[in-house]
Image (cartoon, rainbow, N blue to C red):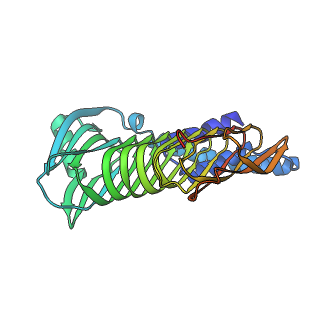
Amino acid sequence: MNEERMKILQMIEKGTISAEEGAKLLEAVEQPSSKESDQREKSKYGLRNFLDDAMEKIKNADFDFSFGEYVEFSDDSILPHEEFQDADLSISNGSLNVHTWDQEDVKASYQVKVYQVETEEEARARFHDETQMDIKNGLLRIASPSKKIKVNVDLYIPNKKYEFIKSQLTNGNLDLENIKSDHFQMKTSNGSVKAKQLSGKTCKMQTGNGAIQLLEGIFEECETDTINGAISLSGDLGKADAATVSSSITVDYKGAKAHTGFYKTTTGRIQVSLPTEKKIDGVLRTKFGQIQCELENYKILKDRKDVANKMLEFEAYEQFENAYHIEAETKTGSVTVQPPVRL
């Protein structure tokens, strides 16, 4: 089982299977077998075939080793002032950092590796031919679709409010800081996703293999999803939804927007510091861990302490008018609910 799990995590690490596929595989290998031997062998055979196919994908997608030698250089691009409300940022191989600055231009600084070329002149020509950066019809687009070009980008955009910022990577870390936009969509198949001081209406953050971190965020809705990595959220969040398979979830509420929180992990712990001045109702679940409700004078509605099925349903702070509902569930970890920093 450990060997199969390692193979699955390798597939996630290389970005060769999706988060959904990885979750199904991890769940399949962790399920105890209670079937007849021929059924077990059939199931194992099917899983091995899938893993063998996926491992072949890994060999073909191991960017830094499959393509051999490379030429490395730095480059900068500047787009003169032109209005845009949306951004679509896509990189197949490499990381992306997005910042705001006080200039009206857009600037991208690149650190580039081009594979299967012999000279820097050839490398630069291929990079400029196969990489897109422009503004058209109110949309800033940056695209690097070639897996044979690894590019780490530092992008600087004007400090203003945007409507929609979408960033999608295949193999690299994603980092956004100090940006205002109605909607954010941040996704990488293999790498961490980090956001600091972002604000808007909705925010979606997803990775197959890596941690997710939202610091000082302000959103009406925030959705985060990873398989192999911890999730850490802090800020003024209305509805927060976080799911991971193999690590912890930590939430620290600040501000008055909070009304709903859904948190789920398989092997990690969940720790939530509740929002201030809210009437609380919640359901906490774990199979093999512990449930800790650290609130004073909370009301117990249901309290189940079965060996492999623990559940606490509770209410607290009924003196407040605005409500906050929390559901937190883990299989092998603990669930801890802590009081607000101040009341």
Looking at this view, is 241 or 40 the one in front?
Answer: 241
Q: Estimate the x, y position of residue 196 in percent, counting from the top left.
A: 37, 42
Q: Residue at x 32, y 32 (%)?
A: 69
Task: Specify the farthest residue to the bottom.
Answer: 137
Task: Specify the farthest residue to the right.
Answer: 36
Q: How many marks?
A: 0
Q: Is 242 on the left-hand or right-hand side of 195?
A: right
Q: Is 293 on the left-hand or right-hand side of 272?
A: right
Give the quarter of the image for residue 297: top right
* The N terminus lies in quadrant: top right
In the rendered image, is residue 92 in sight? no
Give the quarter of the image for residue 296: top right
Q: Estimate the x, y position of residue 253 in percent, counting from the top left.
A: 51, 45
Residue 292 versus residue 226 in the image, above or below: above
Q: Estimate the x, y position of residue 52 in percent, counting from the top left.
A: 61, 44
Task: Specify the farthest residue to the front.
Answer: 319
* The C terminus lies in quadrant: top right
Q: Residue at x 23, y 40 (%)?
A: 110
Q: Residue at x 14, y 47 (%)?
A: 103
Looking at this view, is 119 or 321 the one in front?
Answer: 321
Q: Estimate the x, y position of residue 53 in percent, counting from the top left.
A: 58, 48
In the rendered image, is residue 112 in sight? yes
Looking at this view, is 216 or 31 the one in front?
Answer: 216
